[in-house]
Amino acid sequence: MKVLMISDVYFPRVNGVSTSIRTFAQSLRALGHDVHLVAPDYAHQSALSKDDEPWITRIAARKIVFDPEDYLMKWSALMAYVDNLQPGEYDVVHIHTPFIAHYAGVRIAKKLQVPVIETYHTFFEDYMHHYLPWVPRSIAVHIARLVSKKQCQQVDTVVSPSAQMRDVLQQYGVTTPVSVIPTGLDASRFVPGDGAAFRQKYAIPSQRPLLLYVGRVAYEKNIQFLLEMLHLVIQDHPEVLLVITGEGPAEAMLKKMSKEKRLQQHVMFLGYLDREIGLNAAYQAADIFVFASKSETQGLVLLEAMAQSTPVVAIAELGTASILVQEKGALIAKDEEVHFAEQVQTLLIDHKFRQRVGEQGRVYVEQTWASDVQAQKLLACYQRLFAEHQQLLATAIS
């Protein structure tokens, strides 16, 4: 098939959407299908990274005032690209984000007379009020629900990364068919990282208990909860260290909080790590991966940690609930700092149990979450939509 994906974000912008797009695109291309992506051109993007992926068309973009990490594609530049598209170039349009990409994707599909599908990657209800603080939370939530429903009604099928997120969309009143297709892990996520080298690079003693968080350093990720939890763990494990990787708008607040709670010697902020080498090494170096976000539509980093045999302690809510299975790579914690800390301490104290949980997690991920399995599900969705659309066109002509 010939697939046109369009997104308001992609690498070098590191987040779950970028990872999902690349994972599915690589898997579909490996199956012999043609995948093309339209994404923003980042001002700081190197010429090498542009040339590395010729299947991507970069559109001129501008910075977003309230979110400096992201760039917004310029509508005029995007429409110039759209004007050059011709019927027959693509069989399906796949939208990945609800901003400029959504409206352009709907327009492209209409012009090419092909079906349009959209993945609902982000739980915006729990997201918007952090970035629009001047808007009362109740109003921000209401807006998020209305916009989400309206956009989902404008496409032929919605893809949800989890059954829990599908249920939320249906509660919004979405009547468009929703297919649950999670993002899988590609083979590179299972390549053992060099945990010892990671510890050596950042001067972390080999015996020091290490907790790890990977992801955007954003308000909705609930990292402040992890700092509160860490304060409790330190009482029985005074050497414990929490490494926070990634960047984002909550970083200054978290650093201030660490200082106020006198956690500076127990928290290390590392920024973004290279996905191909650095992240696997970080997972391997950690004793436990900790995650408290309650707004995930899936939670890929949990699977990445398990793929490296690193046990997880996390709150099972929304998308993470579709991943977490007690003692199969994870201990499920309540949304309480004390209970979360107790799960962390259980793993820190019992080395054999920690190792067993980690090993079971790797087996679980290998058997359930491989990227080629999920790509086949997405391909089947594309093919069904295309066949239905062709039938409708034929009926209209006759």
Image: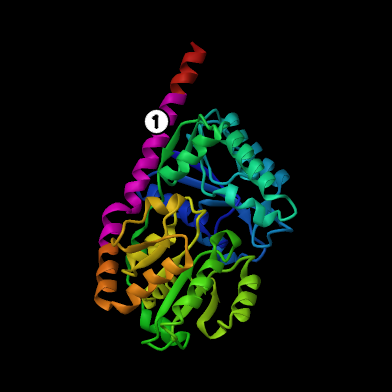
Query: Is residue 388 found inside the magenta-colored segment of the image?
Result: yes
Q: Position of residue 87 (x, y in %)?
A: 55, 31
Residue 366 appears at what percent x and percent y? Answer: 28, 58
Direction from residue 184 to residue 362 in the image, left or right: left
In the rendering, at what x and y percent does residue 173 appear? 54, 32
Q: Vertical placement of 60 versus 214: above or below?
A: above
Q: Residue at x 47, y 69 (%)?
A: 213
Residue under the point 52% across and 44% down? 120
Residue bearing the label numbered 1: 384
Does the magenta segment cover residue 46?
Answer: no
Can residue 34 be seen here?
Answer: no
Q: Magenta residues, as a range?
A: 363-389
Relative to 380, 45 lies left or right? right
Relative to the observer, which residue lies in front, 59 or 51? 59
Instruction: Name the amino acid type tagged 1.
Output: Arg
Element under label 1? helix
* Residue at (49, 20) in percent of width and height: 393
- The residue that appears at 66% across and 41% down in the rendered structure is 143
Q: Decide if residue 262 is on the left or right side of residue 137.
A: left
Residue 20 in picture, x, y percent from top left: 46, 53
Residue 369 seen in the figure = yes
